Image (cartoon, helix red, strand yellow):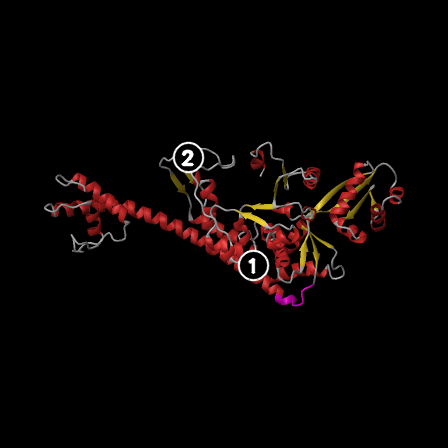
Amino acid sequence: MVDQLKKLPHVIQDGLIWDNQTSEEASQTMQQLVEGNIKVLFVSPERFLNAGFLSVRVYHLWWMKLIAFLSGESHNFGPFYLRLGASLLRGKLNVDCVLAMTATTTLKTLQVVATVAFGISYSSFYFILFFVSLVIESSFLNTGFRQQVIHYSLPENLEEYVQIMLMQETGRAGRDGRLSYCHLLFDETTYFKLCSFMYSDAIDEYSVNKFLHQIFNSATQSSGKICSLVKDSASQKFDMKEEVMLTILTYFELDEMQYLRLLHQLSVTCTLYFHKISPSLLAGKDILVTEILKKFAIKQGHYTCGIPSVANSLGITAIDMLNRLQNLKSKGEITYELTGPAFCYTVLKNPEGFCSLVVQITRWLSEVEICKVHKLDEMFNAVSFAAKHARNQRMLRPFLRADIKIFLQSNSHVKFNPRAVARIMQGISSPAYPSAVWGRYSKIDFPVVIEAATAELMNVTGKDVL
């Protein structure tokens, strides 16, 4: 996004909101957006789902890239994409026009995106296919011409090879119109290792049950309040990757029952230091400080408080609390440190059929896991077949040439062309040569047989190649 932003004309007022920027930079960009000083805004899916960002209703057109992830391809990879859809774009942002673009997505995936992600029928989904003679690329992909491209590892699935490698790696070969070669190096060891990795996201019913109890039981007495799940400790406790936890939380938000609503991820432990006046005096002027002193004790000269706990007591959002802390910091009253990155959410309702929900989640994750393994199998089988096929043809080529030579010598009175010879070698009858006696090379690609026949016809004296 940074590269694309730099390529915009200078006359266009632009902005960028993503994870690799400070809160001050993000706040400054948001202020410019509210004031109408930004015409084109680049935003990452993670920041897009920020409650503060969604509250700004100044958008007229949304342009989305990588829309294949909206169909579910982002499972355990980019769950934020799963949360983008019609209800969010039209309900919260009041956006009527959405431009979703892709260069490699299949028609089947487009149909899923149209019906599931955007909530419209496929028949009313405007699909525009066009070819251009001039392509202007971003600097990210513009790495010059290549005559050789080598892949040193096996892709996890055919989609990855087509959508990513073909565009960013293989697609770089032959751009100058010259013959280029693409090589893929793989072995069974890599295949089995990738198979093992496919199961690294797997979890059983016991882990899912513990995880769901953590999510909902802790919120039984605090429905509608801010809840948090510290990533590191939860990942170790449930033996579950952070991506898997976020995927499950996203599932509960997207479910038709909508059990919870995900909030902006933040660090939920705040270590607070007072500088100008004593905490007790400052508490008389600021209700936030009052609540912190009431709920937490001083230890080693500082206060350590939980952001959700204080925010819930005051009836404010976590973002509001952070803004108040930032305001006190700007006045020189305090300094603070935030630790403990966590998933934050609000429980809307507790599930009734808890056991059935555990089974449902476990089955869903298992189906995704099996699908990923099947895709890897398809990828491995495809490249294995291609490698074996090419190797067999190279080995058979000398024998093919020898058989063609013998055939031409035995039929020196007949004037053949390469295609006629190739048909005979594969046992294919034709009007001029109806006899189908041979057929030994019926499993060899027809163009390869034609190539061999052409070479032999050129070597045989008196045989013109037609």
Whether residue 354 is in magenta: the answer is yes
The quadrant of the image that shows the N terminus is top right
Height in image: 391 above or below 361?
Answer: above
Give coordinates of residue 373: x percent, y percent: 48, 55
Whether residue 259 is in magenta: the answer is no
Residue 301 placement: quadrant:
top right
Q: Which residue is mark 1?
A: 365
Give coordinates of residue 112: x percent, y percent: 51, 56
Pick the front one: 176 or 298: 176
Answer left or right for 358 relative to 180: right
Dot 1 lies on which element? helix
Residue 21 placement: quadrant:
top right
Q: Which residue is mark 2?
A: 146
Disc tally is 2
Q: Earlier in the sequence, mark 1 or mark 2?
A: 2
The quadrant of the image that shows the C terminus is top left
Pick the front one: 353 or 7: 7
Q: Circle 2: is it few (<14), some (14-19), or many (20+) Cα within 10 Å? A: some
Q: Circle 1: is it few (<14), some (14-19), or many (20+) Cα within 10 Å? A: many
Give coordinates of residue 444: x percent, y percent: 27, 50
Outermost residue, top side: 10
Dot 2 lies on which element? loop
State the extent of the magenta-drawn residues as a range.
350-356
- Viewer-nearest of labels 1 and 2? 2
Amino acid under disc 2: Arg
